[in-house]
Image (cartoon, coloured by chain):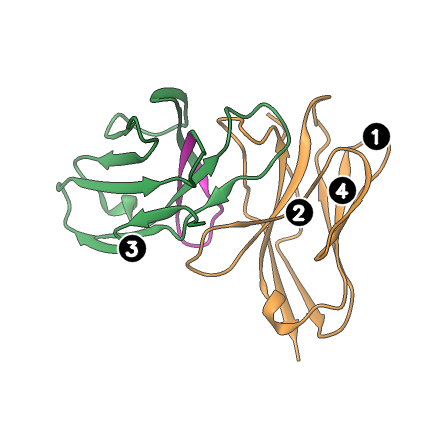
Amino acid sequence: LAKTTQPISMDSYEGQEVNITCSHNNIATNDYITWYQQFPSQGPRFIIQGYKTKVTNEVASLFIPADRKSSTLSLPRVSLSDTAVYYCLVGLTGANNLFFGTGTRLTVIP
Amino acid sequence: DAGVTQSPTHLIKTRGQQVTLRCSPISGHKSVSWYQQVLGQGPQFIFQYYEKEERGRGNFPDRFSARQFPNYSSELNVNALLLGDSALYLCASLKGTGGYGGELFFGEGSRLTVL
């Protein structure tokens, strides 16, 4: 089971780009990298998923180097509403032991 | 379309009691997973069910049990409640069995407080 390491917390000013890096040294060949966002007392919400190189959607980008041992979630021009905990998961979506870890608590400052 | 719905949203129990939490997945989704989230920590996997069969179980005691019904809804039961069972219980639905890339859809959770 590929576990992940990510910073416990980060602070950023509004309007800045935020990059959160996740290490996953023992990622398996078939594993996907998925990021979720969670607000207090709510369920996690899917942000983005990738397998290799770069993936971009309307809210974020995900950068994955060739060795896939790490990944970086990039949030462009964050706002106060982006204050949340961000989880990096490595594995297969339906895997019955997907590991969330403690996540990164992002605080956006006005 | 409705998302994943969970009930009740909040409940308070005393030690030794039993609790049943309910989850309705997104229409068309056949897999349901349960997670426990203690304050300040990430969600921890408890169970996964697909087509009424248990597909996986996390590191939780036998006091925790679950089942899935023909309409794919699910119940999580916890017996002999302990103070440490106080947590947000999350249900997530998935279209298939998994084993591929894709998205878990989470409900808002059931907040259980054990006194």
Q: In what element is the residue under mark 3?
A: loop
Task: Report how far apart the C-alphas of labels 4 and 2 lie in the structure.
Answer: 10 Å
Which is nearer the N-term, disc 2 or disc 1?
2
The amino acid beneath tag 2 is Gln
- Which mark is nearer the camera, 3 or 4? 3
Asked whether the beta carbons under mark 2 and mark 1 sit within 8 Å of each other, the answer is no
- The green-coloured chain is labelled B
Residue at mark 3: chain: B
Task: Report how far apart the C-alphas of labels 1 and 3 lie in the structure.
Answer: 43 Å
Residue at 14 percent across and 49 percent down: it is B14
Report if residue B79 lies within the magenta region.
no
- Which mark is nearer the camera, 4 or 2? 4
Quadrant for the C terminus of chain A, please.
bottom right
The residue identified by callout 1 is: A67
Residue at 70 percent across and 26 percent down: it is A26
Task: Report how far apart the C-alphas of labels 1 and 4 lie in the structure.
Answer: 10 Å
- Which mark is nearer the camera, 2 or 1? 1
Q: Residue B32 carries which label?
A: none
- The orange-coloured chain is labelled A
Residue at mark 1: chain: A
Disc 1 and disc 4 on one polypeptide chain: yes
Residue at mark 2: chain: A
- Which mark is nearer the camera, 1 or 3? 3
The residue identified by callout 2 is: A6
Task: Report how far apart the C-alphas of labels 3 and 2 lie in the structure.
Answer: 30 Å
Q: In what element is the residue under mark 2?
A: loop
Residue at mark 4: chain: A
Task: Report how far apart the C-alphas of labels 3 and 4 lie in the structure.
Answer: 35 Å
Residue at 42 percent across and 34 percent down: it is B33
Local packing at callout 4 (Cα closer than 10 Å; few below 14, some 14-19, many 20+) is: many
Disc 1 and disc 3 on one polypeptide chain: no
The amino acid beneath tag 4 is Ser
